Image: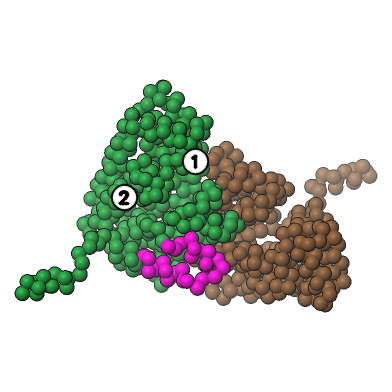
Chain colours: A brown, B green
Amino acid sequence: MSAGRGAAPAMLPPRVEVSPLEPTLRLLRAELERRCPEDAVGLDALERSAMLPPGKLLRPLLFTESAAAAGMRREDTLTAALGIESLHVGSLVHDDVIDSDTLRRGRPTVVARHGTPNAIVTGDALIIGAFRAVAACADGMPAGERHLAVVRTLADAGVDLCRGQVMEDELRGEPGSGLERYLTMVSLKTGALFRAACLGGAQLAGAPPAAQEAFTRFAEHLGRAFQMTDDLLPHISDAETSGKSVLSDIANRRPTFPVLLCWREADEHERGQLSAALGGSLPAEAALETVRGLLASTGALEAARAEALAEASCAKAALLDLPGTAARDALSTVADLSVNRDR
Amino acid sequence: MSAGRGAAPAMLPPRVEVSPLEPTLRLLRAELERRCPEDAVGLDALERSAMLPPGKLLRPLLFTESAAAAGMRREDTLTAALGIESLHVGSLVHDDVIDSDTLRRGRPTVVARHGTPNAIVTGDALIIGAFRAVAACADGMPAGERHLAVVRTLADAGVDLCRGQVMEDELRGEPGSGLERYLTMVSLKTGALFRAACLGGAQLAGAPPAAQEAFTRFAEHLGRAFQMTDDLLPHISDAETSGKSVLSDIANRRPTFPVLLCWREADEHERGQLSAALGGSLPAEAALETVRGLLASTGALEAARAEALAEASCAKAALLDLPGTAARDALSTVADLSVNRDR
């Protein structure tokens, strides 16, 4: 009896937490596999090696859920949604050429595996493929204007992304460059594709202007929450799980959110120490020690975390201007996850 | 009296040959200057330094004249036409990174002046800007479907261009790779943007399918005539005027049209000599001497010239399926010029 009673639960599937985002992610992954077949050769094989295995698929997820929140069937959004991912990955492939990075998502980068010429051409094809995807998904649909609006949104975002890259380079090694310029840079470099994903999805679904504005506001705050958390992660988790390290940011003289907050709170003497540590004149370990000490003494990490949480809250508040749907709840979940993750 | 009679002609403007293409080129140059202002900074300044001074503007010229031949006002085509140029120049900027080229159109390349990171981002922005231009020119126009068709045509061409680059790389150092593969490569690498220009212009103007097909055929033949002539130029003019040299093609092991024809006509012994000259094992001057000798003995240069002229004739024949207009005559002039130029 006790054996029988004990056996019954064992017959049930194990109880696991299934993310409410999982069904859409599964649709996107399946479509991605279909579009990048295993037997691809030449340029198609290069594109496959850049796109698969997939990353978080955050931008196509935002596109599809935004379109769904505006009343569209998720299945009809997948091609355009993966277009956004194609633009994102194309830009990452070029980033890795620029930074001579050899690892991404735990595996060798396209440039490391296939060389600079192939990586540049692969990135180009992925970027151009984004527009092809959006235009292609109009096949058999009457509303050409909607698709054209998505093309425009995506192109604007792509150019903003390039501007953000140039601006990030200008801010390099400038801990005193200021939070305002940092937020502008984040809005361009990270926010642009988040906005394009949410606004583009809404446009494809034919959302009215007021709803499009709410999606855009949501994306803007989400982009900040996401990037602030990205900047914070190396400081609050070990390098293995976060996939990046404080040392790498210091070595690249990248202006990150906690460091900018630290500068704002620091006195003259501390600012001098911070400049020296980020200026490349100290040995790496000593620089790391100094930065860690200053971040702790100024309370910059806690402040950065609080700001990221506040941005996520603003993102969720923007969603309240939209009708209550499962898709809206999914977008809210993305906002929660953007600040609660370890990679 | 004789002074009076002699003075009259001197009052007339000097008689100069004005190309029938000049008015459209002037429109395009003015619009380009307007879009790339002198006081541009950051990414805009980088884009300006890539786009200006302009090259031959052949692709936007084809776009505008094709649209005009299909009934559109030239002034309404300029934004989209320069979109094609933007994609073309973006691709050249990346080409120069790949080949580490330091000179283009007689001045330092973007990569030589601004470094690899800036050149990659500039190329990306120009490529993305092409789609932005096409989408933007729909402002205030009702026919979204037409613009979306142009986006699709341009994206297809952009991906073909990338495929052509990968294929050209595969053919490197293979004089026996065959004319068929060469023609496929030319159709992808050169033909793609010529097709996109002519078909895109026709689509923007709302040309019927039969006319679109004629524009496409024209562009396909024109692309071949143009590339065959490009390959021939270093052999029939000196390096200064042609801007490229046989030596550079040999050094890059690029399979060019005359060399492929030479291979086809050569016997076993001559093929061995040609392979050795192109394989990089001979000193540059000796390789040049050998290639020149074999091109002469096989009659390859004359054969290449004849093929280029035949393609230009086919291009002009395709135009006869279109209504007779000044724009159609301009396209015919482009076909003549494609095979009669020294750079």
* Residue located 42% across and 69% down the image: B33
Lower position in the chain sequence, tag 2 or tag 1: 1
Crowding at label 1, few (<14), some or many (≥20) Cα neighbours within 10 Å?
A: some
Instruction: Choose between B10 and A235: the one closer to the eye.
Output: B10
**Whether residue B216 is situated above or below residue A256 in the rendered picture:** above
* Spot occupied by residue A140 in the image (x, y as percentages of width and height): 45, 55
Residue B47 part of the magenta-drawn span: yes
Instruction: Choose between B127 and A173: the one closer to the eye.
Output: A173
Where on the picture, by quarter, is residue B83? bottom left
Magenta residues (range):
B28-53
The residues tagged by marks 2 and 1 sit, at their Cα atoms, a distance apart of: 24 Å
| Residue A64 horizontal side relative to residue B127, left or right | right
Q: Which residue is mark 1?
A: B252
Q: Which residue is mark 2?
A: B341
User: Disc 2 residue type?
Assistant: Arg
Quadrant of the drawing holding the N terminus of chain B:
bottom left
Q: Chain of mark 1?
A: B
* Spot occupied by residue B288 in the image (x, y as percentages of width and height): 43, 35
Where on the picture, by quarter, is residue A239? bottom right
* Spot occupied by residue A321 in the image (x, y as percentages of width and height): 64, 75
Crowding at label 2, few (<14), some or many (≥20) Cα neighbours within 10 Å?
A: few
Is residue B49 among the parts visible in the rendering? yes
SS for dot 2: loop
* Residue located 23% across and 50% down the image: B320
- Specify whether disc 2 shares its chain with disc 1: yes
Q: Which mark is residue A235?
A: none
SS for dot 1: loop
Q: Main secondary structure of the magenta part?
A: helix
